[in-house]
Amino acid sequence: MSMGADYIAVNGIRFEIRRNARRKNIAVGVDDGVYFAAAPQRVSRKELESLLLRNFDETIEALKEKLAAQRGGGHKYRAGELFYCRGELYPLEISDGPLRFDGSAFISAPFGDADAARSAFEFFYARKTRSIVQEEFPTWCKRIGAGPKRVNIKNVRTLWGSCSASGSITFSLRLALVAPPLMEYVMIHELCHFFEMNHSKDFWLRVARWCPDYAERRAELRRSGYTW
């Protein structure tokens, strides 16, 4: 439980309210056994309650499945189960064809087993992360005045990114799961290592120049368990 956290109870279910000025939409999820509603600053409690009541039973069922999956060590990959893409949760729809994302849902033919499902999502997230990096990273390289010799996208679960002394940057493919401002922070963080190969005061001052609210973004990355 977060210190000073705000909560709202809907139909006897308590949600932690996680407000963020950069967020445009409301998303619900569960991590560390806590149901949460991520919401823009402008949304009132009454509006939030009204939105949570829409399709409430289906939402809670999906959240319970996600919670069970977390406690049981993994997803079940069933229709309606929620998965992250760029910080928002989207349902899985079972249809035909390889795993894909249409902007409102993940769609896939039935998976042979959990390993096949995990591999399909890993492949999807790796491609998505690479696409985002190719589109957004060059702008930050130009702004900050640094550029890696090589960029790698890997399934790294303990780090969001890393910068080597040889001038290479590695990004975790999990970055496709997080909200754009969080990925932006990781890109800024790694580029700043080209000037300070440490986490000294000077390093954080450099990060703050480009990302004044880096501490908030960093804390959100640490708090949220983005998995598939």
Image (cartoon, rainbow, N blue to C red):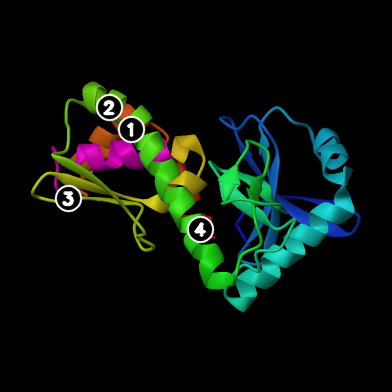
Identify which amino acid the numbered label 2 is placed on.
Pro
Q: How far apart are marks 2 and 3 (CA)?
A: 23 Å
Q: Magenta segment range? A: 183-197
Q: Quadrant of residue 149?
A: top left
Q: Name the residue under label 4.
A: 120
Identify which amino acid the numbered label 4 is placed on.
Ala
- The numbered dot on residue 134 is 1
Q: Distance between the residues labelled 4 and 3?
A: 36 Å
Q: What secondary structure is found at the residue carrying circle 1?
A: helix
Classify the position of the N terminus by image quarter: bottom right
Q: Which of marks 1 and 4 is nearer the N terminus?
A: 4
Q: What secondary structure is found at the residue carrying circle 2?
A: helix
Q: Which of marks 1 and 2 is in front?
A: 1
Q: How far apart are marks 1 and 2 (CA)?
A: 7 Å
Q: Which of marks 4 and 3 is in front?
A: 4
Q: Where is residue 27 in the image (x, y as percent from the top left)?
A: 68, 43
Task: Judge from the rendering whether residue 19 lies leftward or rightward of residue 131; answer left or right.
Answer: right
Q: Nearer the viewer, mark 1 or mark 3?
A: 1
Q: Mark 3 points at which residue?
A: 198
- Is residue 204 located in the magenta-colored stretch of the structure? no
Q: Which of marks 2 and 4 is in front?
A: 4
Q: Which residue corresponds to the image point at 76% horizontal and 65% vertical from the top-left?
A: 64
- On the question of residue 119 being in view, the answer is yes
Task: Judge from the rendering whether residue 91 lies leftward or rightward of residue 49; answer left or right.
Answer: left
Q: Which of marks 4 and 3 is nearer the N terminus?
A: 4
Q: Mark 2 points at which residue?
A: 138
Disc 2 residue crowd, few under 14, some 14–19, many 20+, Cα 10 Å: few
Residue farthest to the bottom, as pictured: 72
Disc 4 residue crowd, few under 14, some 14–19, many 20+, Cα 10 Å: some
> Could you tell me what secondary structure mostly forms the magenta stretch?
helix
Q: Which residue corresponds to the image point at 88% horizontal and 42% vertical from the top-left?
A: 54
